[in-house]
Image (tube, grey):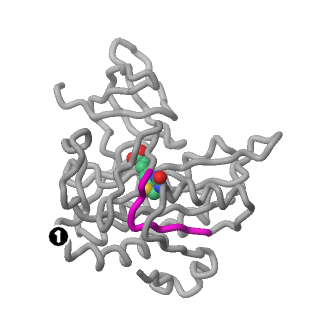
Amino acid sequence: MGIDFKTKKDNCPLASFYRVEVRDEIDSTNTAVFDAGNKGEAEGFCMIAKRQTAGRGRRGRNFFSPENTGLYLSVLLRPSLDAEKALLITTAAAVAGAKACERICGKNVEIKWVNDLFLDGRKIAGILTEGSIKPGTSKLEFAVMGIGINVIPPKGGWPEEISSVAGALCDSEESYKDVLDRLSTEFLNEFYDLYSKLPNTDYIEEYRKRQLATGKRINVLSGDGSFRKAEALGVDDCFRLRVKFDGEEKESAIDTGEISIRIED
Ligand code: BTN
């Protein structure tokens, strides 16, 4: 596969920022890039795999990553950011991913707070940002931003546990090879554009206008599997989700955890 960094702005130093390594198979691109970060590798190291044997999602979940089906990509970052601002990396990647996918499929791609991309009501991508903190500080030593995009549906179908929610960007096998290069290039270009300006968050309107949760009834999930019902009101200036929990008068803002959209009310 080939990545063409000359597609956007002439003065964008993308080709010198990213060093892309493509693997046929790896356990997890996030794990490999995190190891590289620990060994002192410079910012911009990017690994793309055609298959992951142990792809990881948020909350310790597995990310289904079969061969010739998706884009599995991780980038090593060394931002000058407090660890508590790591959410900005995830949200910048969500906007970059949504825009890249929209250019390929020509449809609107939605973002489900905080890190999932949806097309036609199905999850087509997820983002996992992991970080290491500088000892004795609150600053990030490095971060790894990983994105997995389902480019086409897997030949054998989705595993049962995700079959009701998982979807893909395109539907045919022929599109896979064509799409992969374009999608990676578009995504890396867009992501650099936003990441290089952080902590500037001018992209927040792009995030808000694609927000799937706003105005919907949701479940706010806790780590122990329990949930609270709420109404999602919107995304605040710090990318927290503003919610009104059932039975409460005042608004709350959540910055961690996960939501699901309720369909029964
Ligand atoms: C989620 O949906 O919870 C996040 C999924 C993130 C998956 C990507 S695929 C590339 C990178 N490597 C991993 O092991 N995970 C991320």
Where the N terminus falls, by quadrant? bottom left
Residue 93 in view, yes or no: no
What residue would you read off at disc 1? 172
Give the image location of residue 257, x and y in percent.
46, 32
The residue positioned 61% from the left and 63% from the top of the image is 197
The residue positioned 19% from the left and 31% from the top of the image is 263
The residue positioned 27% from the left and 73% from the top of the image is 176
Residue 166 in view, yes or no: yes
Give the image location of residue 54, x and y in percent.
44, 51
Residue stretch rendered in magenta on the structure: 45-54
* Residue at the farthest top position: 247
Q: Is residue 118 left or right of residue 71?
A: left
Identify the amino acid type marked 1: Ser
Query: Is 39 included in the stretch rendered in magenta?
Result: no
Q: Quadrant of residue 230?
A: top left
Q: Quadrant of residue 107?
A: bottom left
Give the image location of residue 171, x and y in percent.
17, 65
Q: Is residue 110 left or right of residue 156?
A: right
User: Pointer 1: residues within 10 angstroms few (<14), some, or many (20+)?
Assistant: few
Residue 70 versus residue 256 in the image, above or below: below
The secondary structure type at the circle numbered 1 is loop
